[in-house]
Image (cartoon, grey):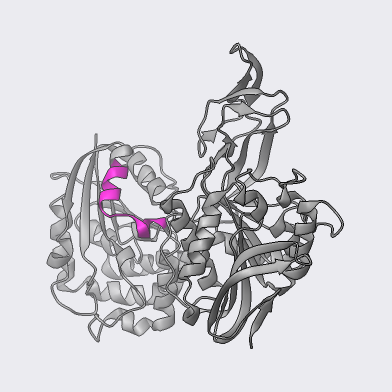
Amino acid sequence: MAFTICNLTADPGEKLSGELTLGGGEFRLPATVVCGERPGKTALITAGVHAGEYVGVQAAIDLARELDVKKVVGTVVVVKVVNRPTFERRKGSMGLSDGKNLNRVFPGDAKGSEMERLAHAISQEIFPLADYYIDLHSGDDYEELTPYVYYAGVADEETVKQSRQMAAWVDVPYMVRSHVGSGGAYNYAASQGIPGILIERGGMGTWSQEETHSTRRDVRNILCNLGIYQDEKDYRKHYPLDVVDVCYQYASHGGLWYPFKKVGDMISEGEFLGEVRNYEGNPVEGCWAQSDGVILYQTASLQVLENGPMIAYGRISREFDSRKERITKYWGKRSDSFLTQRRSELHSPLAGRWREAIGARLPQGRRLKILDVGCGTGFFTILLAKEGHDAIGTDLTPEMQAHSVTLAREEGADCRFLVMDAENLDFPDESFDAVISRNLTWTLPHAEQAYGEWTRVLKPGGVILNFDANYGLSDFADTSSLPKEHAHHKLGNEMMQECEEIKRQLPISAYNRPAWDISVLGQKGMREFALDLDMGKRIYVEKDEFYNPTPLFMIYAKKA
């Protein structure tokens, strides 16, 4: 069916651009309606609610041009500038005639001031047609911020849940749950049952191609995850962490504002954040952190208003990060096949090649205490124990740990296995002569943190051996290049697709590896490095059930 919004009607398979006429003809908003050939949900995208926040405006303009109607299932409505009169006169973000903040007056008033009438028209004529809502913002002309996303938090349980899911697909470091149900456009929409988010990126009255490109990627990824846009989802660098207990601090005095921190900085309770001074340069007001947290945004102009915002920050919470739970469950489902594969691999030519490759890099002439991180079903741990070393294997998946014990018993190997998080090791400092790992770092949500832990538990002069690959460049759902007897063929398409989806949630998938790994290890205190980019060619000679087509690399790092 055709889709009608205000005065615009788009037929199935049509992309229609024009002006939405609403509020009895008072407001004319530039918009594009992308009506897919197949029926489905409707996504509303707006920008310019704050007319001086340009990243969202340019991103909306580009999205309207770039969205392929053939890939749309349902309808996408893009309103490019909501507060158009103020935008076209370059008068900042408040209402042109009433000086009111449009994003504080929803649902508005048909008989109120200019911004109240505009909010009412949108609430009555646009929101009822939307199933999902994405509002694009940036910092105002006085404001700098670290990219983050708000999601609607005052609505029915299902709407809040869907809003949070939308926020989790945005490529920004942080997300914040809103605790108001009206005033803001997306807040009010959510109170009417429309899941909604507000993306913040950029600021200071400017925009860049990089910022608008990132915002467009965010919107496309959200539309893909909602099933409204049929395209491949892009990789992300961030999986947003929840920021809670957000503190907004305002100036008691107008004057000159001097921030002492940068947006994105971590702060501690009681830390000095900045001060307001008079024209003689004398401090008239100081600003101290009331809690630990991360700075989300702050005034960056020299001037600050009385009762105007100085800075906002909040406490980072990992309570809602579900990636590890999903990763653990996934590898638990694959643990039985891992046991079968490693049982065979221990008695294949690969075992000898691995012993040779590892032995060439370990300190010689003594029994070593070695930690095998992410050991799976214990392949490396068992090999090292049979070589006479004191080997301990850890894995986050209980099923893997149980199978490791079984396999070690079968092999007569004297080694131990523990359920443990590679990013939070439960060992004292300087406990091991070597830390070894295979095909683990690409699965970690916080790989940099893991490297810090591995370095911490190493003795001085100890070594890290990490065998991994840049799996972010591979599509695990495509098994066409693998030999017929390969283990991945036995897992089924659904299992491989789930692995691919998990991988796309991990920042490391977008990094330039192994260059990124070397840089991080150097920052963590490792000083002597060696890199082998041909390791896979020497290990996986035969194209059999164990074959790995992705080029395997080896990183050797020695602690100072």
**Toward which corner of the image does residue 406 lie, by quadrant?**
bottom left
Q: Nearer the viewer, residue 455 or 115?
A: 115
Q: Nearer the viewer, residue 92 or 441?
A: 92
Indicate whether residue 9 is drawn in magenta: no
Residue at 61%, 29% in the rendered image: 269
Left of 315 or right of it: where is 416?
Answer: left
Residue at 48%, 72% in the rendered image: 67
Indicate whether residue 520 is drawn in magenta: yes
Say above or below: 243 vs 325. Answer: above
**In which quadrant of the rendered image does the C terminus lie?**
top left
Query: Magenta span: helix, strand or loop, mainly?
Result: helix
Left of 162 or right of it: where is 449?
Answer: left
> Which stretch did the figure color magenta?
507-521
**In which quadrant of the rendered image does the N terminus lie?**
bottom right
Left of 217 or right of it: where is 474?
Answer: left
Tell me if residue 378 can be seen: no
Residue 496 lies, in percent from the top left, at 39, 77
Residue 185 lies, in percent from the top left, at 71, 57
Tell me if residue 131 can be seen: yes
Residue 3 lies, in percent from the top left, at 65, 81
* Total numbered circles: 0
Residue 100 lies, in percent from the top left, at 75, 45
Q: Nearer the viewer, residue 533 or 60?
A: 60
